[in-house]
Amino acid sequence: AQSVTQLDSQVPVFEEAPVELRCNYSSSVSVYLFWYVQYPNQGLQLLLKYLSGSTLVKGINGFEAEFNKSQTSFHLRKPSVHISDTAEYFCAVTLTGTASKLTFGTGTRLQVTL
Amino acid sequence: GAVVSQHPSWVICKSGTSVKIECRSLDFQATTMFWYRQFPKQSLMLMATSNEGSKATYEQGVEKDKFLINHASLTLSTLTVTSAHPEDSSFYICSAGISGRPDTQYFGPGTRLTVL
């Protein structure tokens, strides 16, 4: 079975600073990888996804992530964060070629301050 | 992008009553719908997967008689929490997708259930 680890439960950062949210996964077979953002009392919004091809994936709101197969990682980055980026971020995986059953990490709370 | 709605967005009920939550895909046909549960400051836990016209597949540890899922059409799935108790209080989120397309899962806004 696949699993996802988000080691950082909280990441505080000042506005306009760069940020990296870490995600590592474990799976014996190929996976698809996703990053979602959740604002308070709301559902999940897809930031970006890796299915195949280029390992650098660009998403919405200026976020990008890089798939590293050898390190089984899919870290999320943004060069300059804004106050509005304050939210919970979830990394998720699903097996390729199957129904879309997602396995989520425990989430990282990004707190952006002035 | 695709839109998934949930109704109600929040509900408060008394212990022992049943509550129905609707999940609708508004602009596409969802062959598969998923129901998740999220406790405060925690991740999403998959409860069950439902395919249109067939019985739902429940995850281990989820009581199928307590959490009734119906996926009667390609645009509507319902979750009924029967005989609700305070420990059922949670944030319930549905998602809708197309079977075999893992990149097409879209999430609803969630329903906050509080059982008194």
Image: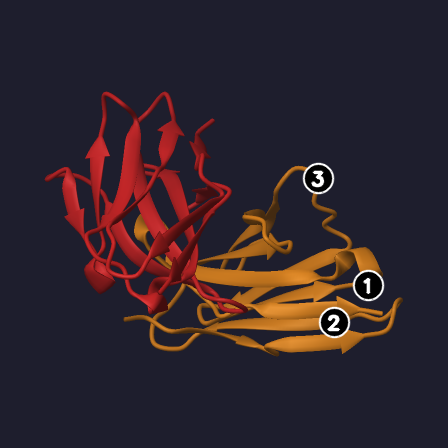
Chain colours: A red, B orange
Query: Cβ–Cβ below 8 Å for labels 2 and 3?
Result: no
- Dot 2: chain letter: B
Using residue B38 as the reference point, say whether residue B81 is left or right of it.
right
Element class at badge 3: loop
Q: Which callout, 3 or 1, points at the residue further toward the start of the chain?
A: 3
Element class at badge 1: loop
Image spot of residue B25 (x, y percent): 42, 72
Query: Cβ–Cβ below 8 Å for labels 1 and 2?
Result: yes
In the image, residue B31 above or below residue A94: below
Which residue sits at x=23%, y=21%?
Answer: A70
Mark 3 Cα-neighbour bin, 10 Å: few <14, some 14–19, many ≥20: few
Using the image as rendered, state which of residue A12 and residue A92 is in the foreground. Answer: A12
> What residue would you read off at disc 2?
B19
Q: Amino acid at mark 3?
A: Gly
In the image, residue B114 above or below residue A67: below
Image spot of residue A36 (x, y percent): 37, 54
Quadrant, the C terminus of chain B = bottom right
Give the distance between the C-alpha atoms of the residues marked 2 and 3, in whole angstroms: 20 Å
Mark 2 Cα-neighbour bin, 10 Å: few <14, some 14–19, many ≥20: some
Image spot of residue B3 (x, y percent): 37, 73
| Label 3 and label 1 in one chain | yes
Give the distance between the C-alpha atoms of the residues marked 3 and 1, in whole angstroms: 17 Å
Which residue sits at x=77%, y=55%?
Answer: B66
Q: Amino acid at mark 2?
A: Val
